[in-house]
Structure formats: structure tokens, C-alpha cells
Amino acid sequence: MNKIQNQTRPVFPFTAIIGQEEMKLALILNVIDPKIGGVMIMGDRGTGKSTTIRAIADLLPEIEVISDDLFNSHICDYDLMSDTAKKKLEQGLNLSTEFIKVPMIDLPLGATEDRLCGTIDIEKALNEGIKTFEPGLLAKANRGILYVDEVNLLDDHLVDILLDASASGWNTVEREGISIRHPSRFVLVGSGNPEEGELRPQLLDRFGMHAEIRTVKDPSLRVQIVEQRSSFDHNSISFIQKFQDKQNELKNDILLAQEKLSSITIDYDLRVKISEICSALNVDGLRGDIVTNRAAKAFAAYQSKDKVYVEDVKKVITLCLRHRLRKDPLDTIDSGTKVNQVVDDILSNELL
């Protein structure tokens, strides 16, 4: 109880969110395996995009980081460790650690490249020979979630930087011949309203998943959502307590899935079917194949299975491919529907 009371700002529980199953699944799978490559959420205004994203960050277990480290460095994983931390370990120094909540970083629309990547103090470097780095949002987001609202309105070169860092897991800052590199592995979540413009196809393709959400039409569900929100606003502490068991259960499921992920297998024949679907849909490149394989494994782990089955692929493949299809202005059917038709044709003869 005290822990909830001490929070500066109560967060709406993830398990209390009604509907929007596609968005919730995409976020959970990216948390289980951040290498899926993030998720782009496109939908109407006021459909709970930001609420859901903040809720998944709040749900996640705390992470162990090296104390006073600018990059949330892991104590033993070299891929998640800053160069400074590595040097200290190599020198045999004892490093103290602490547990912190998973970082949830918002990228404002007006952010500059320096704010995103960080800056090097050139004057200090030249005069004193000391590399002084002022970390940006990519450093703070390491091992966390980086959220960009209205990503379709963000400058294209900033989106490029974001996607490069997300794909490689590293951010490199170079100024006047001085270079600093640090880990930047995060789950990239973008959201936007299609009425305000689309992302360029080559940028959209870099997001692992694409979730589409619509305003709930069912009147009884709408009433339920309004009642939930009113109840939370009236007394957030008791509302959060009511969903605590469900929150803990989901948190444990995610932790178990993360542990199980590396042991999940996918049969060769099923991998061929996935590539056959991508080929039939004329998906450019191989990102679609790779992401679908990763997402299917993450979903199988989430379902406590030992291997991927056809139904696991069917559950995730639309999320992974709908944004990779070439746009045809004469098309009368939705890209998601087109993916489902091809999937049904190719996988219909497969045994579940």
C-alpha cells in the first residue's frame, strides 16, 4: 500500500484496460523480446494509446543497474554495459548496484538531435583532455521503453536516428573528431493518428510490428470504459489495489516467457511457410520473415509452449506484415485483411 501511495503519479493498471487486444499483445511481445524491433500504433484520437504504453512500463519488474551510471548499465551483460563500467570491471573495482523501475522515456516532438543523442563538451575535451558526455534520451532509455507520440510528425532524420539505435542497440556521438559510444537497447514505441499523415514506407518498415486500433463502437463497452476511468480518477489507490493480483500474474507470465524464449523452436517447414507468405504478399526485403519468426517464438513462450505452432504464427503475422505491403491506391481492401487472406490460403492445409 505504501509503495503505491509513494508514487508521484498513479498509473492506470495494464490489466484494467478494456479492449485494444492487438495493441496490448504487440507491447507484451516486444517486452518479452525487444529484438522484435518495437511497435507502431496507429489509431483514432482518445483510444488509450498513451495510457496503455505507460501502463506496460509500470507493470514491468525493476531492473538491476550499476549505481551512478549514466546508461543504466547491466552488472554482468557486456552488451548492456557502458565503456566506463567495463573499464572499472577490468580494473577489478567493486561496483555497487541498485534496482530501479524500467525507464519510460518520452521523446517530445520539438526535440533536437543533441537532446536525443547527447552532447560532448568540446571545450573541456580540448583544454583538459577529458571526454565529458552529457547523455541524451537514448542513454536514459537504455534497457527501457522509448515512446514517441505523433511519430508521423517527427522530423525524418530524428526517426532515422531512433530506428538505427533501436536496431543496433548502440548510439554513437561524434563531434570534432571525438567519439563516444554507449549501449542504447530499448523497446521503441511510436503512436500516431493516420489523419495527420503517414510515415514514409522505408521508416515504417523499420518498426517490427504495426498495430491498428479503432474507437470502440459497442455502447455497453464504452460505458464500461468510462466507468473504469471514473473509478480510477476518483480513488486511484483502491483501483490499483483491485487489479494488483492480475498485474502480478501478468508480470510473472512475462518473466517466465523471457526465461523460456531462448529454448523455443520453430520447425523448418513452418519457417518455409512464413517466407512463402511474405513472398506471396510481395514484401520487400527479409525483415518481415525475421520479425514474424521472432514474434511467433515470443508468443509461444508467452503461451508456455516449447515450440511454435501454426496458430501462434496466425496470431502474430498480421501485426508483423501489414505495414510492409506496397500501397496500391486502387486497393479496396485493408492491408491487414489482405495478409489474413494469404495466410489462410497458405496455412489452411497445415495441422494445428
Image (spheres, rainbow, N blue to C red):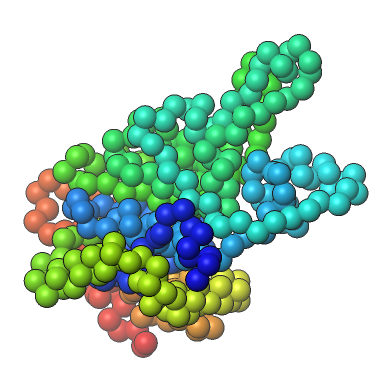
Q: 220 above or below 53? A: below
Q: 205 above or below 338? A: above
Q: Position of residue 90 (x, y in %)?
A: 87, 46
| Left or right of residue 68, residue 267 in this image | left
Q: Position of residue 112 (x, y in %)?
A: 44, 27
Q: Quadrant of the C terminus?
A: bottom left
Q: 201 above or below 19? A: above
Q: Position of residue 195 (x, y in %)?
A: 16, 43
Q: Residue at x 77, y 22 (%)?
A: 130
Count the marks.
0
Q: 53 above or below 342? A: above
Residue 166 seen by the camera: yes
Quarter location, residue 53: bottom left
| Left or right of residue 306, residue 341 in this image | left
Q: Residue at x 72, y 49 (%)?
A: 67
Residue 339 seen by the camera: no
| Left or right of residue 274, residue 304 in this image | right
Q: Position of residue 196 (x, y in %)?
A: 19, 40
Q: Residue at x 43, y 62 (%)?
A: 56
| Left or right of residue 245, residue 140 in this image | right
Of 83 and 289, nearer the camera is 83
